[in-house]
Amino acid sequence: DTAVSQTPKYLVTQMGNDKSIKCEQNLGHDTMYWYKQDSKKFLKIMFSYNNKELIINETVPNRFSPKSPDKAHLNLHINSLELGDSAVYFCASSQDLDSNEKLFFGSGTQLSVL
Amino acid sequence: AQSVAQPEDQVNVAEGNPLTVKCTYSVSGNPYLFWYVQYPNRGLQFLLKYITGDNLVKGSYGFEAEFNKSQTSFHLKKPSALVSDSALYFCAVKPHDKIIFGKGTRLHILP
């Protein structure tokens, strides 16, 4: 079983569209994250959720709206997609927010906005 | 500002030789320190971490890292490189509630 799974793996869409990326973890972790990796491979945190509550929002445009229906899921909805949104988006989870435990990453969603 | 620096974009090492991937950090307090590896088209995978105690930490795939508090460094090392070690390596620190990643260093092991 994949510990952190995200879908779709690839997403190609036109500018202005709205799209969603789904993420699920089966590790029983309390904390989930969204990271964005740009074309230069720089990895930047976007959001973190702990037990369905938003903890970190790293000055991400409000076109990005995370939703956590339960602690095993953290979905990312993006409105009015822009060219600059093209990147690889990674979901991750950890045991909890304050621990020194490692992150488990999904395999990424490559978003291409045309 | 809290930050992590990986000064080398790419490191080339011949197979069988020792390798070092450098990392320095600038954060307040005593952070947790991590190394992750990313293979092509994959998510990051945990290699090792330093929390406290012995400055030399051993991790997966024969990697180790040395914590140096005075130099605020956490360099990744391996005594003998394998071609399969070729990947993108990220240093990370966790000063409080979030993990901050370096920009990554591409490690290229030459056969």
Image: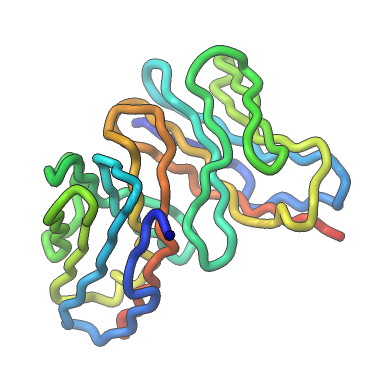
Residue at 65% in and 24% down: B66
Is B77 on the left-hand or right-hand side of A21?
right
Residue at 42% in and 59% down: A2
Residue at 62% in and 17% down: B55
Percent from the top left, x then y, of residue B71? 59, 19
Is B74 on the left-hand or right-hand side of A36?
right
Is B92 on the left-hand or right-hand side of A23?
right
B92 vs A65: above or below:
above
**Residue sitting farthest toward the front:** A1
Residue at 19% in and 40% down: A50
Percent from the top left, x then y, of residue B28? 37, 20
Residue sitting nearer the eye, B101 or A82: B101
Percent from the top left, x then y, of residue B32? 44, 26
A79 vs A53: above or below:
below
The quadrant of the image that shows the C terminus of chain B is bottom right
Q: How many marks?
A: 0
B6 vs B32: above or below:
below
Is B59 on the left-hand or right-hand side of B50?
right
The quadrant of the image that shows the N terminus of chain B is top left
Locate residue B35: give its quadrant: top right
A38 vs B54: above or below:
below
Colouring scheme applied when the structure was drawn = rainbow
Residue sitting nearer the eye, B87 or B21: B87
Residue sitting nearer the eye, A70 or A60: A70
Locate residue B54: give its quadrant: top right
